[in-house]
Amino acid sequence: MASGMLLRVVHPRVSAQKLLVISSLRNFPVRPTSATTTTVLPHRQSSSEVSHDYSRMWTLERIVATSMLPIIPATIAISSPVLDYTLALLLTVHSHWSLENVIHDYIRPRLHGEAAPRIAIAVLYFFSAMTLGGLFYFNYNDVGLGNAVRMIWKL
């Protein structure tokens, strides 16, 4: 009855028949067929994975990212093979670790099976090695990363 008064206050056009239907629905017995539980599973569940120190890895990722801040402009400003190779290494490591985190977050063994994450990580290692080799080759046999950026800016 109180719900009917509340509905009339909120919606004055609600008819008495609609109120009876609503009040009869309130008394309808609803029994759950099964217990519903929500479990939060860790995103890295692999039987072969060993525990890692992720806080140390996070710190190392931040060190690499912040060390790139002065190295990128220095490589462009100063023509030095040491800076070219350092930038090539830092860019490759930074992008490799970032993509590895994406793979661990989105290609989970629980959802995609045990083989899919391993294949994705193997492909990532292959392309990271090819990227590092290509950048080193470019630095050794061509003008280097810093000079290449300067040449593009001259256009």
Image (spheres, helix red, strand yellow):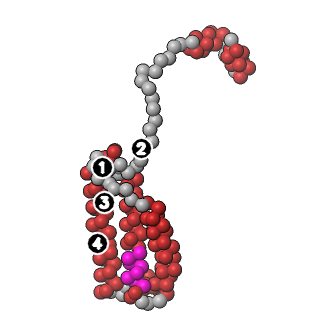
- Which callout, 1 or 2, points to the residue nearer the camera? 1
Q: Main secondary structure of the magenta part?
A: helix
Label 3: how many Cα within 10 Å (few below 14, some 14–19, many 20+) = some
Query: Are dots 2 and 3 in contact, CB under 8 Å?
Result: no
Indicate left or right for 59 with 22 as reference. Answer: left
- In percent of width and height, residue 83 lies at 42, 85
Q: Earlier in the sequence, mark 4 or mark 3?
A: 3
Residue at the spot of label 1: 47
Snapshot quadrant of residue 86: bottom left
- Which contiguous range is marked in magenta? 83-90
Residue at the spot of label 2: 41
- Viewer-proximal residue, 59 or 16? 59
Q: Is residue 129 above or below residue 53?
A: below
Snapshot quadrant of residue 125: bottom left
Q: Tag 3's secondary structure?
A: helix
Q: Residue at x 46, y 84 (%)?
A: 75
